[in-house]
Image (spheres, helix red, strand yellow):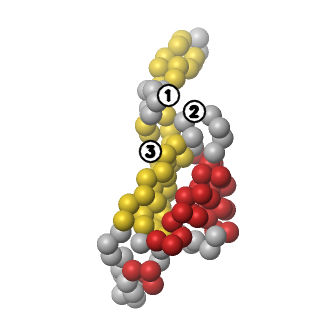
Amino acid sequence: MKLITAIIKPFKLDAVRDALTEMGLHGMTVTEVKGYGRQKGHTEIYRGAEYAVNFLPKLKLEVAVASDQADASIEAIVEAAKTGQIGDGKIFVSSVEKTVRIRTGETDVDAL
């Protein structure tokens, strides 16, 4: 099993969720986060004063998938989240040793 962690622009959440749901994946965790990458933030003007925004608002999605669904899931996220602009985000993939559904005691792929 794999844990896919994607950092995306907030307005792309619905498109990514729809793309993963169409694949038959159900369930994800979404966290509001702030950060920066190569763009290192930007400047904005508020009431005539310019100020630096060092950390940009992003969303962190976490989705656990069967290993054979990982590549298709990554491709779906990329297609749905891509704008072609700086700051589109990143995807990280980690191996998952064990998963347990608390309510039923099901484990691994059955617990997804």
Q: Is residue 85 visible?
A: yes
Query: What kind of residue is marked 2?
Result: Ile
Of labels 1 and 2, earlier in sequence is: 1
Image mark for residue 105: none
Residue 92 spot, x, y in % from top left: 43, 53
**Which residue is painted at 57% across and 32% down in the image?**
86
Residue at point 36%, 87% (across, down) = 105
Q: Nearer the viewer, residue 53 or 1?
A: 1
Q: Secondary structure at mark 1?
A: loop
Identify the residue shown where x is 50% and y is 38%: 57
SS type, badge 3: strand
Mark 2 Cα shell of 10 Å, populated few (<14), some (14-19), many (≥20): few
Residue at numbered disc 1: 39
Circle 3 sits on which residue?
Answer: 33
Which of 16 and 32 lies nearest the eye of the viewer? 16
Which amino acid is tagged 3?
Val
Image quadrant assignment for residue 71: bottom right
Q: Secondary structure at mark 2?
A: loop
Task: Kindly identify which residue carries mark 2.
Answer: 86
